[in-house]
Image (cartoon, helix red, strand yellow):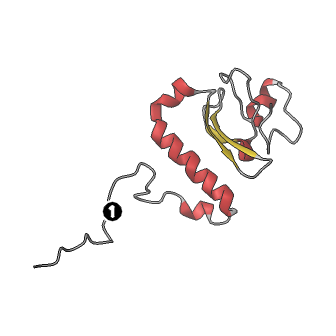
Amino acid sequence: MGRIRRRDKDKKRGFSIFDDEEPADVSADEDLPKDEAGRRKIKRQYSELLGVRIEKLKGRILNRERINKTIEGVYFICIDCKKVSHNMDDGLVEDPENVSNRCGGCAKAKGIPVPPGGGKGQAAA
């Protein structure tokens, strides 16, 4: 009997929305620490994935991640500037009802008190 050939390992087996077809601005991320460059890439992917729905989802939390036992990372859309942000990079003034979350810069501009540490690090409770 003849042998059955396996698929070429070079070919992709599926499509993922997070696959980069052409890397965008990779040179800008070269001088950043590895974790910050990864967060920028994920924020860019969220922006591309959500597209026009960012207007509908503004002020909402997109994802929470555990960085270590004490630090929680939060991806969210700022209600004022409508950018996908991360609390470690941009700060976070969290709304208890999860409808009007703001980045640290927009909160300062609005006169809202920012938690100690500039709103960076842990999510405000």
Give the image location of residue 49, x and y in percent. Answer: 46, 41
Q: Secondary structure at mark 1?
A: loop
Q: Residue at x 32, y 71 (%)?
A: 9
- The quadrant in which the C terminus is found is top right
Q: Check the image and name the residue furthest to the right.
A: 116
- In front here: 22 or 69? 69
Give the image location of residue 100, x and y in percent. Answer: 68, 23
- In front here: 16 or 91? 16
Q: Amino acid at mark 1?
A: Lys
Work out whether 5 lies above or below 18: below
- The quadrant in which the N terminus is found is bottom left
Does residue 81 appear to the left or right of 21 in the view shown?
right
Work out whether 80 lies above or below 5: above
| Residue that badge 1 annotates | 12
- In front here: 2 or 69? 2
Does residue 18 appear to the left or right of 37 in the view shown?
left
Does residue 16 appear to the left or right of 33 in the view shown?
left
Q: Residue at x 61, y 61 (%)?
A: 29
Q: Residue at x 52, y 42 (%)?
A: 46
Q: Residue at x 62, y 66 (%)?
A: 30
Q: Residues within 10 Å of mark 1 (few under 14, many from 20)?
A: few
Q: Check the image and name the residue furthest to the left.
A: 1
